[in-house]
């Protein structure tokens, strides 16, 4: 394991003379697609950069009208350009390079994949390498496309920004990537994630979603790698053995790998105990977290795991996995379980629901842990990478 390369970041008020006048492009194709963590990363990175950098000029490329509104900062050195058509199979290889020819930038930051002809310096954000390590989570054609696109993007990049130490180590080991060009820029927690103190407002919001009873919360898309079926079996075990009064509330949209969820719910006789909101607006998530007795996040693979720190910021006890990036993100502020053992997930949840003083300590540690992850820190480290690898007039 290589010692991590570091980006010192840019302190508030520090002059940006090294990169004054850089033209920076950010390709954010996941925004506007209800893409969960990747979309949050795109939006919060742009907003964070807009807060700290008034010197460099930014062009934010996106592929749909919804993204234009979400990425607009109102800052004079930021502009949003909507690529056409909205089909990524066309906009990535054709529209983006053509736009870069017409209006050159000195450095292009790709948060999903790089175009096949980047035509200049490129940085690449790597969220995870699950298509390589866990191919069973993807249909064959999608997995083949993603592995090729990720590999090509990594090869083309001047540097790779990884969202966790786990992801960076995976990159170094799988691709023999130069350690001095791989950096960690952890994700952050928006300030809106905090405990909802007004119980009346909290109850009213939850009731608007049909939530009237105590519940265990699971946030994220319903997909195989989130271990939805393992969580359902653990919840069933708690219902049978401990007679817990809780519902299991899923907040997130269904995906192509969630087709086995309804049959399992029926098989286990959990129909009356499962709630599913589908996709919910970001502004409602603090209510779901604050009202939950525990967050259940027994994922099999994560590049970071945003719901873990979002729940902690809201004072919610967290039960999550002891694999991939999740121990790194959770630290000592969560109950870690083996996601491959249903009984371990059930025991962890039972401890979170009945732990007394332990739960109080978890809440306090979680609030402190969440404060260590901010989007301004993500933006400052990313800006430091722009400074290091960008050159004014590198592409004209």
Image (cartoon, grey):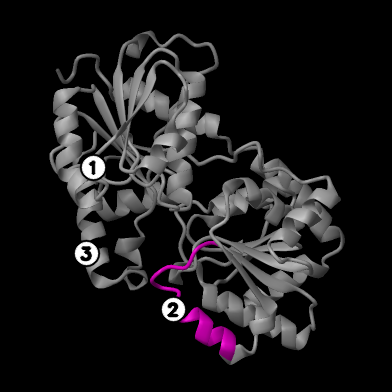
Relative to 337, residue 155 above or below: above
Query: Can you give x and y, in whole percent of width and height, for residue 333 in the image?
Result: 69, 52
Disc 3 versus disc 1: distance between alpha carbons? 16 Å
Disc 1 versus disc 2: distance between alpha carbons? 31 Å
Query: Can you give x and y, in whole percent of width and height, for residue 265 in the image?
Result: 58, 84
Query: Can you give x and y, in whole percent of width and height, for residue 109 in the image?
Result: 30, 33
Task: Pick the residue in front: 298 or 176.
Answer: 298
| Sooner in the amino-acid sequence: mark 3 or mark 1 | 1
Q: Which mark is residue 114?
A: 1
Q: Which residue is mark 3?
A: 144
| Sooner in the amino-acid sequence: mark 3 or mark 2 | 3
What's the residue at 44%, 51% (across, down)? 166
Mark closer to the observer (1, 2):
2
Magenta span of residues = 252-266
Relative to 244, residue 216 above or below: above
Q: Which mark is residue 259?
A: 2
| Sooner in the amino-acid sequence: mark 1 or mark 2 | 1
Tag 3 near tag 1, CB within 8 Å: no
Q: Secondary structure at mark 1?
A: loop
In terms of image quadrants, where is residue 236? bottom right
Say if the magenta span includes residue 160.
no
């Amino acid at each position: 394991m290589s010692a991590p390369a570091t980006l010192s970041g840019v302190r508030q008020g520090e002059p940006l003379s090294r990169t004054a006048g850089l033209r920076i492009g950010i390709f954010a194709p996941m925004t506007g697609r209800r893409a969960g963590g990747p979309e949050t990363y795109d939006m919060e990175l742009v907003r964070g950069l807009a807060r700290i950098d008034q010197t460099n000029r930014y062009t934010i490329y996106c592929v749909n009208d919804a993204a234009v509104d979400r990425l607009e900062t109102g800052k004079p050195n930021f502009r949003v350009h909507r690529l056409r058509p909205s089909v990524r199979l066309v906009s990535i290889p054709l529209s983006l390079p053509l736009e870069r020819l017409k209006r050159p930038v000195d450095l292009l930051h790709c948060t999903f994949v790089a175009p096949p002809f980047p035509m200049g310096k490129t940085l690449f954000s790597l969220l995870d390498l699950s298509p390589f390590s866990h191919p069973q989570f993807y249909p064959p054609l999608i997995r083949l496309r993603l592995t090729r696109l990720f590999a090509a993007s990594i090869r083309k990049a001047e540097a790779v920004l990884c969202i966790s130490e786990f992801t960076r180590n995976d990159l170094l080991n799988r691709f023999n990537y130069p350690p001095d060009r791989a950096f960690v820029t952890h994700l952050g927690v928006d300030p809106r994630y905090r405990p909802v103190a007004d119980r009346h407002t909290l109850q009213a919001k939850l009731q608007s979603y049909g939530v009237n009873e105590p519940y265990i919360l699971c946030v994220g898309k319903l997909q195989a790698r989130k271990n939805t079926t393992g969580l359902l079996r653990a919840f069933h075990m708690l219902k049978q053995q401990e007679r817990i009064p809780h519902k299991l509330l899923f907040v997130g949209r269904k995906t192509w790998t969630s087709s086995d969820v309804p049959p399992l719910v029926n098989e286990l006789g959990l129909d009356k105990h499962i709630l599913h909101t589908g996709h919910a607006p970001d502004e409602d998530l603090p209510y779901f977290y604050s009202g939950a007795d525990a967050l259940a996040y027994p994922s099999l693979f994560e590049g970071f795991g945003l719901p873990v720190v979002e729940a902690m910021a809201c004072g919610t006890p967290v039960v999550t996995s002891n694999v991939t990036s999740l121990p790194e993100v959770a630290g000592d502020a969560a109950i870690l379980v083996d996601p491959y053992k249903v009984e371990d997930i059930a025991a962890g949840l039972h401890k979170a629901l009945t732990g007394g003083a332990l739960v109080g300590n978890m809440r306090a540690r979680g609030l402190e842990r969440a404060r260590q992850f901010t989007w301004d820190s993500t933006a400052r480290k990313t800006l430091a990478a722009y400074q290091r690898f960008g050159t004014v007039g590198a592409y004209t």
